[in-house]
């Protein structure tokens, strides 16, 4: 298992972002570190779920992979398409639900930085910047869908890379993926300081037992699962 220091760099350089689109942050860079360990190249079919600016999708396209990127947010879709044009890289960007838009297709690698921040609302936001991070009271409303859909999205030997907070239950994710028939484990970890969203929810998170009094650092993990 790798413990990674998170820094900004080429991944987020020269990217445009429309209002409400999630810009590359620590979790994006952690997923990029995990992606760097995978064998990509011509003939590799990659899917990114929740592409945002398209930073990771473009990172994979630079290595020669054929990349499909999906996002439920129209501003994110437009942003990713603009960044692909600006960087002269082929990127197939789709709008809508990832499972519906990729139905019947299989990929060599699926990567996602899904919404995973625990939020008081019991449904996912339908608009605004919170759409990129709010994921219900346990932070798993999107994570669980990815886990359940992954076997159908992956070819034999295909790999899923998913980043999320330790607050969401990394063991639950590994268990769910394993139950779905995949081999899964945490491969990368990092700690980042709490941002404004978590700080604004401190009292609620403590009441839910998702944080302890005085917590200031959040553990991020990348879970790697393979279709055997």
Image (cartoon, helix red, strand yellow):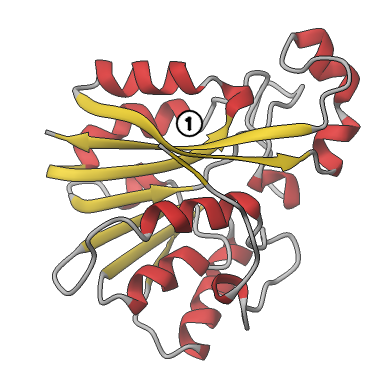
Query: Number of callouts in the render?
Result: 1
205 or 120: nearer the viewer = 205
Q: Position of residue 130 (x, y in %)?
A: 73, 44
Would you identify the image quadrant in which residue 88 lies?
Answer: bottom left
Near mark 1 (Cα within 10 A), the count class, few <14, some 14-19 or many ≥20, is: many
Task: Tell me if residue 200 comes above or below residue 41 in the rendering.
Answer: above
Q: Position of residue 221 (x, y in %)?
A: 52, 36
Q: Is residue 132 left or right of residue 45?
A: right
83 or 4: nearer the viewer = 4
Q: Is residue 56 left or right of residue 224?
A: right
Secondary-structure class at tag 1: helix
Q: Position of residue 11 (x, y in %)?
A: 54, 71
Would you identify the image quadrant in which residue 211 lies?
Answer: top right
Residue 73 in sight from this viewpoint: yes
Task: Tell me if residue 163 comes above or below residue 51 in the rendering.
Answer: above
At x 38%, y 50%, the residue is 111
At x 87%, y 15%, the residue is 213
At x 81%, y 43%, the residue is 195
93 or 37: nearer the viewer = 37
Residue behind mark 1: 143
Q: Position of residue 114 (x, y in %)?
A: 53, 42
At x 43%, y 41%, the residue is 162
Task: Tell me if residue 168 comes above or below residue 25 in the rendering.
Answer: above
Quadrant occupied by the C terminus: top left
Residue 105 in sight from this viewpoint: no
Quadrant occupied by the N terminus: top left
């Amino acid at each position: 298992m790798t413990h990674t220091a998170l820094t900004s760099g080429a991944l987020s350089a020269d990217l445009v972002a429309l209002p409400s689109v999630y810009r590359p942050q620590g979790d994006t860079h952690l997923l990029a570190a995990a992606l760097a360990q995978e064998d990509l190249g011509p003939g590799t079919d990659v899917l990114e779920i929740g592409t945002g600016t398209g930073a990771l999708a473009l990172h994979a396209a630079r290595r020669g992979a054929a990349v499909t990127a999906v996002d439920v947010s129209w501003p994110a879709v437009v942003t990713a398409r603009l960044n692909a044009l600006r960087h002269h890289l082929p990127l197939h960007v789709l709008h809508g639900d990832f499972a519906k838009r990729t139905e019947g297709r299989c990929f060599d690698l699926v990567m996602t930085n899904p919404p995973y921040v625990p939020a008081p609302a019991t449904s996912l936001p339908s608009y605004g910047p919170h759409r990129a991070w709010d994921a219900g009271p346990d932070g798993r409303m999107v994570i669980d869908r990815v886990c359940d859909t992954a076997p159908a999205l992956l070819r034999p030997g295909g790999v899923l890379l998913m980043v999320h907070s330790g607050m969401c239950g990394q063991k639950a994710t590994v268990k769910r993926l394993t139950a779905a028939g995949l081999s899964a484990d945490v491969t990368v970890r990092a700690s980042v300081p709490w941002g404004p969203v978590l700080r604004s929810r401190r009292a609620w998170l403590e009441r839910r037992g998702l944080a302890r009094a005085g917590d200031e650092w959040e553990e991020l993990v990348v879970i790697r699962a393979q279709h055997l």
